[in-house]
């Protein structure tokens, strides 16, 4: 793994420290670089700049809302088997709010093509999926990316309420085709977890919003805080204890059991990211 750089992209998520600590435990001989750039397009550029400065062959890029497990080693091992033209390899995460296994928050990039890729990062405000759009353009130029069935960790667990609100506000525009499914799931879960109630607030506000949507932690900050205050939703404390990898592994294993035996879970998975898409080479738009 000496040919690997590691970068955590943070937007001051509640799990930033936990994300870094878990990676330090998994990669004790590596420096874990942390970026804190916004908007998101700037975070992608800064990640690539760090990678180019280090000059290694691959860069593992993990978003700070991902809590990684030891299975991330399997993602890195995939780099040994891919063609030299492959620009990126991506695993799966167990997502708290879009409750299934799906690709998010983890990327293994080949550094050789980063300078070219930087030319294809969309300007903020022009895309809800700047990283995916960049990858799609690179694939069309002959540098495909590979989706693999490795589950590298948890995504969007233990987040601040204002970040959950913003994330689900964006989901209303980014995943509007899941409208009925998401609202029904969050409604059922909100009775036992306030995070899902906040998700509903953000999503429903997003459905009514007709302005420009930015992938930026500062976007509509005042509006978000006011709405949460009006609902008397208290700010979460900074995480006092780390979220250990064993907890993440247990959560993922429990979901796998549900996926194997519960039809409603299977149907939801298939409606969002079916197993047929878990292992494939992507040469064009996903």
Image (spheres, grey):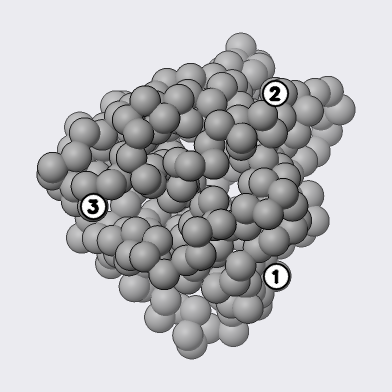
User: From what the image shows, is residue 276 above or below residue 241?
Assistant: below
Q: Residue furthest top?
A: 222
* Within-10-Å neighbours for mark 2: few <14, some 14–19, many 20+: some
Q: Position of residue 210 (x, y in %)?
A: 86, 27
Secondary structure category for the residue under label 3: loop
Q: CA distance from mark 1 to mark 3?
A: 36 Å
Along the horizontal axis of the image, is 96 left or right of 141?
left
Of the pair 237 and 267, the residue shown nearer to us: 267
Secondary structure category for the residue under label 1: helix
Of the pair 147 and 221, the residue shown nearer to us: 147
The residue beneath circle 3 is 1
The residue beneath circle 2 is 124
* Mark 2–mark 3 CB contact (< 8 Å): no
* Residue 254: mark in rendering: none
Of the pair 227 and 255, the residue shown nearer to us: 255
Of the pair 187 and 42, the residue shown nearer to us: 42
Along the horizontal axis of the image, is 95 left or right of 32?
right
Circle nearer the N terminus (1, 2): 2
Q: Nearer the viewer, mark 1 or mark 2?
A: 2
Q: Position of residue 156 (x, y in %)?
A: 46, 45
Dividing the picture into quadrants, the one containing residue 116 is top right
* Residue 271: mark in rendering: 1
Q: CA distance from mark 1 to mark 2?
A: 29 Å
Q: Position of residue 115 (x, y in %)?
A: 56, 31
Looking at the image, which residue is at 59% across and 71% down? 280
Secondary structure category for the residue under label 2: loop
* Within-10-Å neighbours for mark 1: few <14, some 14–19, many 20+: few
Q: Nearer the viewer, mark 1 or mark 3?
A: 3
Q: Confirm whether residue 60 shows in the render.
A: no
């Amino acid at each position: 793994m000496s040919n690997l750089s590691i970068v955590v992209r943070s937007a001051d998520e509640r799990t930033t420290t936990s994300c870094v600590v878990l990676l330090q435990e998994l990669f004790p001989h590596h420096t874990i670089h942390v970026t804190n750039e916004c908007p998101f397009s700037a975070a992608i550029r800064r990640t690539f700049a760090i990678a180019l400065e280090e000059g290694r062959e691959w860069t593992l890029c993990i978003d700070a809302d991902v809590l990684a497990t030891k299975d991330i080693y399997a993602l890195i091992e995939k780099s040994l088997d891919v063609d030299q033209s492959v620009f990126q390899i991506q695993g799966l995460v167990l997502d708290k709010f879009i409750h299934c296994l799906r690709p998010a928050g983890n990327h293994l990039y080949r550094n050789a093509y980063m300078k070219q890729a930087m030319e294809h990062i969309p300007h903020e405000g022009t895309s809800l999926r700047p990283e995916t759009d960049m990858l799609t353009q690179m694939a069309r130029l002959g540098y495909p990316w590979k989706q693999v069935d490795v589950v590298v960790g948890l995504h969007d667990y233990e987040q601040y309420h204002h970040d959950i609100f913003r994330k689900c506000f964006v989901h209303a525009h980014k995943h509007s085709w899941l409208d009925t499914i998401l609202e029904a799931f969050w409604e059922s879960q909100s009775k036992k977890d306030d995070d899902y109630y906040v998700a509903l607030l953000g999503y429903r506000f997003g459905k009514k919003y007709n302005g420009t949507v930015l992938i930026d932690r500062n976007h509509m900050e005042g509006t978000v805080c006011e709405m949460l205050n009006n609902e008397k939703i208290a700010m979460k404390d900074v995480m006092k204890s780390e979220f250990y990898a064993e907890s993440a592994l247990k959560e993922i294993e429990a979901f796998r059991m549900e996926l194997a035996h519960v039809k409603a879970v299977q149907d939801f998975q298939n409606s969002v990211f079916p197993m047929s898409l878990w292992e494939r080479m992507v040469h064009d738009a996903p």
